[in-house]
Amino acid sequence: MGALYFIRHGQASFGAADYDKLSDVGVQQARVLGEALRSRLPKVDAVVTGTMLRHLETAESCLVGLGQRVGVQTMEGFNEFDHVEIVERHTPRYADPAVMQEELAATKDPRRAFQEVFTQAVGRWVAGGHDSEYRESWSAFKKRCLEALATLVASLGPSRTALVFTSGGPITAISQDLLGIPDEHAFRTNWTLANCGITKVLYSERGRYLSTLNEHGHFEGEHRALITYR
């Protein structure tokens, strides 16, 4: 069997001018992950990332920790959905970032307040009742992620090992499909995906199988301060 290790990117820069760039914690998470994978994966056949900066930076730091030089292939199919648009469609006044920042800053916990808005916005997107309002509907997003998975498996061939650096959305869509989870429950998985957590998918000529979901034991014990979810 072949094995695909889907890795959610390290912590991004929430609240900064460029969210897509890894935070210092995110860089450290990726390095620790790479070090933890050294004994588990003596040979990696391929490294794939989405095209987002946080995917590429996570791969770069992880490979340093892993101690392997592997060429990196980018695939747009593993990019995250447009969370900015999804929030704006749910709360149109948030099309002005200043309005959103002002309202969130006035709450006791801006991060929690944003998460509540985001959860509601994603629920609207997934429900499918407003697909025409989005550049990419939930169903189109799922199709894109599953097509990327199929393309990757076909390009690798049998019994290969690959690291795939991506975001929580593609991991959610792929896991949902493999487990047969209804759309309305898909994001119950997403909300608990840890930064630099591993979701392992096995593949063979018989099909694809979810082996592990959101594994992040490499951050327990001495590295427990590195467990983050956004």
Image (cartoon, grey):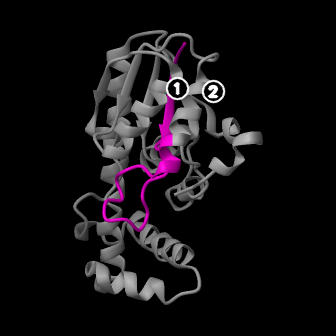
Quadrant of residue 196 within the rendered picture: top right
> 218 and 198: which one is in front?
218
Q: Between residues 197 and 135, which one lies in front from this camera angle?
A: 197
Q: Which residues are magenta?
A: 1-27
Give the number of the disc on residue 149.
Answer: none
Q: Secondary structure at mark 2?
A: helix
Q: Which one is in front, 184 or 173?
A: 173
User: In the displayed structure, would residue 90 be above or below residue 137?
Assistant: below
Q: Nearer the viewer, mark 2 or mark 1?
A: 1
Q: Which of the two residues, 22 or 88, is positioned nearer the viewer here?
A: 22
Q: Amino acid at mark 1?
A: Gly
Asked if residue 159 is among those painted magenta in the image, a careful observer would answer no
Residue found at x 37% / y 15%: 156
Secondary structure of the residue carrying numbered label 1: helix
Circle 1 is placed at which residue position? 65
Residue occupied by mark 2? 36
Q: Residue at x 32, y 38 (%)?
A: 50
Q: Residue furthest front?
A: 24
Q: Is residue 23 magenta?
A: yes
